[in-house]
């Protein structure tokens, strides 16, 4: 009887070791390019996905637009290893047209609106209407925004729409690469900052004011697609699927992102 119990325990141990070895053998290093708008949510989502699958996500961050070395289009152009990319949908569509990604794998992950924040220690302005937002922008000594999708909208659409494009040229602080606007506000490099809400919420020390007024808001869809040169295509597809789960949607919501609207 003792021998039989020992034999069963030994068999179970061998089976457990075999399963562990099998999981390790199937584990993959997945190279990910991602917009900073997902950075706060990914702090929770990535460890959970890695724990559940055994895969390891190697993430490089950058804006969806821009010409700095960190910008996602520049990373893609330089041939940086990539299995899957998360970026603003319109920017991803451009890359798909260029043959970089597999069209059938494109999936909308979340929607991201632009928000307003100010550096620590200064009064919070009222930005609840376009006129009050205009006043706040003109009153600020300096205004920071990124070279990414939000910054493109701010300089190309928002400022002209508010009639302050010329006035803002002297006080604009362009944040390039993967650095977020909140970091500039935190250092005191700018008084007021505009960026995706999820990116501003990454910094607890700054003062988040709220979203842009509805009349001048820009909501961007963040999408994902698998690279045509992916070495870990199946693991990349699994990560995209995981980000559409109820758990992931709840985490996105808590970090300032909304579920994508159905077409």
Image (cartoon, helix red, strand yellow):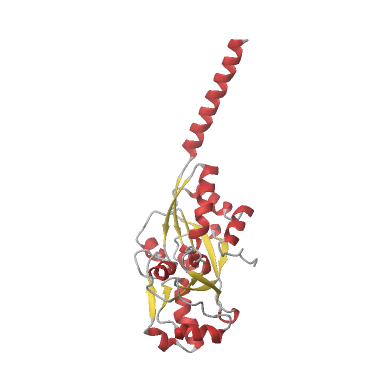
* Relative image position of residue 179 (x, y in whole percent): 39, 65
From the viewer's side, name the closer residue of 18 and 99: 18
- The answer to which quarter of the image holds residue 145 is bottom left
* Relative image position of residue 44 (x, y in whole percent): 53, 53
Location of residue 87 with respect to 146 vertically, above or below = above
In the picture, the quarter occupied by the C terminus is bottom right
Residue at x-position 57% and y-position 15%: 6
* Relative image position of residue 62 (x, y in whole percent): 41, 63
The number of numbered discs placed on residues in the rendered structure image is 0
From the viewer's side, name the closer residue of 29 and 128: 128
Asked if residue 197 lies left or right of residue 79, the reply is right
From the viewer's side, name the closer residue of 178 and 204: 204
Asked if residue 204 lies left or right of residue 179, the reply is right
In the picture, the quarter occupied by the N terminus is top right
* Relative image position of residue 240 (x, y in whole percent): 55, 54
Residue at x-position 54% and y-position 28%: 16
Residue at x-position 44% and y-position 60%: 100
């Amino acid at each position: 009887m003792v021998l039989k119990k020992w034999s069963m325990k030994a068999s179970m141990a061998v089976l457990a070791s075999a399963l562990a070895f099998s999981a390790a053998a199937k584990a993959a290093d997945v190279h990910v390019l991602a917009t900073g708008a997902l950075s706060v949510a990914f702090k929770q989502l990535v460890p959970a996905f890695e724990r559940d699958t055994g895969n390891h996500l190697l993430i490089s961050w950058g804006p969806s637009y821009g010409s700095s070395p960190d910008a996602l289009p520049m990373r893609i152009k330089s041939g940086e290893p990539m299995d899957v990319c998360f970026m603003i949908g319109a920017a991803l569509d451009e890359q798909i047209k260029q043959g970089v990604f597999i069209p059938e794998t494109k999936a909308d992950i979340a929607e991201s609106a632009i928000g307003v924040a100010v550096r620590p220690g200064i009064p919070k302005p009222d930005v609840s209407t376009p006129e009050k937002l205009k006043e706040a922008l003109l009153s600020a000594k300096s205004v920071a925004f990124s070279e990414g999708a939000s910054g493109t909208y701010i300089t190309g659409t928002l400022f002209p729409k508010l009639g302050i494009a010329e006035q803002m040229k002297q006080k604009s602080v362009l944040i390039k690469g993967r650095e977020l606007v909140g970091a500039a506000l935190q250092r005191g490099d700018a008084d007021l900052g505009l960026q995706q809400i999820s990116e501003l919420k990454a910094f607890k020390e700054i003062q988040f004011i709220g979203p842009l007024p509805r009349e001048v808001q820009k909501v961007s869809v963040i999408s994902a697609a698998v690279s045509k040169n992916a070495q870990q295509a199946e693991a990349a597809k699994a990560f995209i699927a995981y980000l559409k789960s109820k758990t992931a949607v709840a985490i996105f919501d808590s970090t300032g992102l909304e579920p994508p609207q159905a077409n």
